[in-house]
Image (spheres, rainbow, N blue to C red):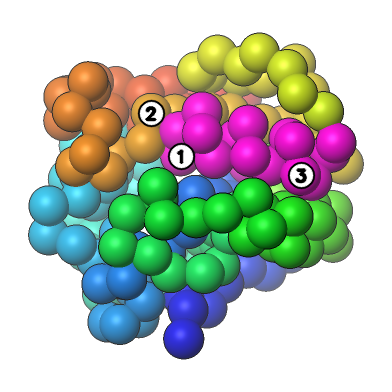
């Protein structure tokens, strides 16, 4: 069991997580762990005008926002993933992005983006948070800090600020 993709053509933003948490996969919604800071930061950022919870993740397709993951195998923590997971799933992700061609692909965390690059593009390169030089097909790429509670380096306000930058870029 894993999380279904929330994908369609014409998306403004496709959020890409590292992989589903065990809890999110069990309840069937992205970032469902109450300790994950995605939804509070998302709501503070103004990416949409209403407050959204994990149970409403699929409704964001109507706002041009979708969700998927680099690897679709759920684990309690991202550290539970293996290189084989990325070898299996990163090329699938690349195909999805090229097929659906969202305006902007937003990776949650440098680890997710680097895993995609290595196993989806076959490259190892330095990456920074923010807008990337590289595109995937016609889609621009943006990297924000991972909102996982394990990533305590960034506060809720820091995360909301990154999603605000994403909002500003997506409106250009």
Pointers 2 and 3 in contact (C-beta within 8 Å): no
SS for callout 3: helix
| Disc 2: CA contacts within 10 A as few (<14), some (14-19) or many (>=20) | many
On the picture, is 43 further left or further right than 73?
Answer: left
Residue labelled with disc 2: 145
Query: Would you say residue 43 sits in the magenta stretch?
Result: no
Mark-to-mark CA distance, 2 and 3: 20 Å
Magenta region: 105-122
State whether residue 59 appears in this view: no
Determine whether 163 is above or below 16 in the image: above
Residue depicted at x 73% and y 35%: 117
Q: Which label's residue is closer to the chain start, 3 or 1?
A: 1
Number of labels in the image equals 3
Determine whether 122 is above or below 67 in the image: above
Foreground tag (3 vs 1): 3
| Residue 68 image point, x, y percent | 55, 61
Residue labelled with disc 3: 119
Residue labelled with disc 1: 108
| Residue 140 image point, x, y percent | 72, 32
Residue 65 badge: none
Residue ranking furthest to the left: 34
């Amino acid at each position: 069991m894993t999380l279904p993709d929330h994908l369609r053509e014409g998306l403004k933003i496709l959020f890409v997580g590292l992989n589903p948490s065990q809890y999110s996969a069990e309840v069937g919604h992205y970032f469902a762990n109450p300790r994950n800071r995605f939804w509070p930061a998302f709501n503070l950022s103004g990416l949409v005008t209403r407050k959204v919870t994990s149970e409403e993740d699929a409704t964001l397709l109507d706002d041009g926002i979708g969700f998927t993951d680099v690897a679709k195998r759920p684990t309690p923590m991202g550290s539970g993933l293996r290189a084989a997971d990325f070898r299996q799933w990163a090329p699938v992700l690349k195909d999805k992005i090229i097929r659906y061609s969202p305006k902007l692909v937003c990776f949650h965390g440098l680890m997710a983006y680097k895993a995609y690059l290595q196993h989806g593009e076959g490259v190892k390169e330095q990456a920074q948070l923010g807008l990337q030089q590289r595109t995937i097909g016609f889609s621009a790429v943006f990297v924000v800090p991972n909102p996982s509670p394990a990533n305590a380096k960034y506060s809720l306000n820091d995360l909301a600020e990154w999603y605000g930058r994403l909002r500003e870029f997506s409106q250009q």
